[in-house]
């Protein structure tokens, strides 16, 4: 089961102004092939279907625990998309005839349709940057633990490339801060799955595959997280369970920056962002004139 904490996994300042084009770029990280919905659900379903849990406890604990962290990642991407869209909508009851979204398609492509068309939601959607819905068959779960771990390693590295692409698509500082965080955490997950494979098979992952290719310089916004040691930490997203991840996550970090560390409990994180209300998407207000008219009718009726 899950416990929910009403905070984001990391401190994420609200963007200073709306940037729907950046929002569309970040949307890829929600529902794209290599987005957070795919990592979340891949590890989630692998944990549901895991056999011989007791015999293979540390591997089960690792997959299940990382799935919980990924839940926080979809929340963070959702907050980033909505933060970037915050204030982009026309304020007030009517748009006064302004074509406020007229430039969106020109600059941002069809993906922006997703933010405009749904009306009531008009926020983050469970789709990629082109508005294509996320698909359950992005999940890989063979039931063969070695193959699943190898796939997870591939998935984390594929996800890093997707983040780099999103980074290269927008220069928005708020979007880039979130990318810096997710890039760092993706490195942890790739290294964790590589270590699990080493333990399970005896293969020397550093010889077999050049991993993890962190390249922190590619995303300068990940540097503050690297300096704080986020790339050496696995958080235990449980009050009592998954302690067995220590059997996989220990020793020195592959980049030689220091010892790996398991932290009990989730990160402190940051507050949820306040979002402006969108009156046109909810129950419309009455005009003062309408209320006066209604009052007059009621008065006349009572009198009559
Ligand atoms: Mn993730
Ligand atoms: Mn991950």
Image (tube, rainbow, N blue to C red):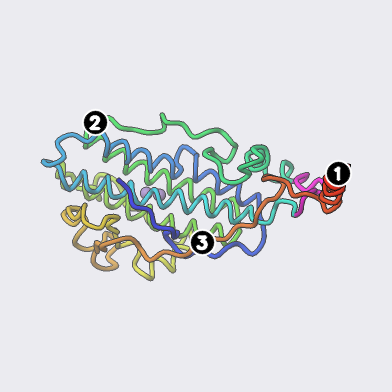
Identify the residue under disc 3: 177
- Between 92 and 130, the one lying in front of the other is 92
- Separation (CA) of disc 2 from disc 3: 36 Å
Residue 110 among magenta residues: no
Left or right: 62 as drawn, with respect to 114: left
User: Which residue is at 67% across, 37% downward?
Assistant: 117
Residue shown at 56%/33% (left/top)?
Answer: 132
Q: Which element is circle 1 on?
A: helix
**Residue 172 image point, x, y percent:** 61, 59
Magenta span includes 96: yes
Which residue is pictured at 64% across the width and 52% down the height? 85
Circle 2 residue: 143
By secondary structure, the bulk of the magenta-drawn segment is best described as loop
User: Range of the magenta residues?
Assistant: 92-103
**Tag 1 and tag 3, C-beta contact below 8 Å:** no
Nearest to N terminus: mark 2 or mark 3: 2
Q: Nearer the viewer, mark 1 or mark 3?
A: 1
Considering only vertical position in the picture, is 110 above or below 249? above
Q: What residue appears at the point 45 percent right and 65 percent down from the top-left corner?
A: 270
Q: Nearer the viewer, mark 1 or mark 2?
A: 1
Going by the image, does 8 lie left or right of 274? left
Whole-number angstrom distance, CA of label 1 to CA of label 2: 70 Å
Under tag 2, what secondary structure?
loop
- Element under label 3? helix
């Amino acid at each position: 089961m899950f416990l929910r904490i009403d905070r984001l996994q990391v401190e994420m300042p609200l963007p200073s102004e709306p940037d729907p084009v950046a929002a569309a770029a970040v949307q890829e990280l929600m529902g794209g092939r290599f987005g957070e919905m795919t990592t979340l659900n891949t590890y989630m379903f692998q944990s549901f279907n895991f056999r011989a849990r007791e015999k293979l406890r540390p591997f089960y604990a690792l997959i299940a625990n990382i799935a919980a962290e990924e839940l926080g990642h979809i929340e963070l991407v959702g907050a980033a998309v909505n933060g970037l869209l915050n204030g982009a909508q026309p304020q007030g009851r009517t748009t006064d005839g302004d074509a406020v979204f007229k430039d969106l398609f020109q600059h941002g492509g069809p993906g922006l349709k997703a933010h405009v068309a749904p009306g009531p939601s008009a926020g983050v959607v469970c789709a990629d940057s082109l508005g294509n819905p996320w698909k359950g068959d992005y999940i890989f779960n063979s039931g063969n633990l070695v193959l699943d771990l190898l796939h997870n390693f591939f998935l984390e590295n594929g996800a890093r490339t997707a983040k780099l692409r999103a980074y290269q698509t927008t220069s928005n500082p708020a979007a880039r801060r979130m990318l810096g965080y997710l890039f760092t955490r993706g490195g942890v997950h790739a290294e964790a799955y590589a270590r699990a494979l080493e333990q399970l098979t005896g293969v020397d992952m550093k010889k077999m595959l050049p991993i993890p290719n962190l390249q922190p310089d590619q995303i300068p916004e990940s540097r503050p997280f690297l300096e704080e040691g986020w790339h050496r930490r696995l958080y235990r997203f449980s009050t009592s369970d998954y302690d067995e991840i220590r059997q996989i996550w220990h020793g020195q970090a592959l980049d030689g920056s220091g010892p790996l560390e398991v932290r009990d409990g989730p990160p402190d994180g940051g507050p949820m962002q306040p979002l402006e209300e969108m009156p046109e998407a909810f129950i419309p207000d009455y005009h003062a004139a309408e209320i006066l008219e209604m009052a007059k009718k009621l008065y006349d009726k009572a009198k009559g």
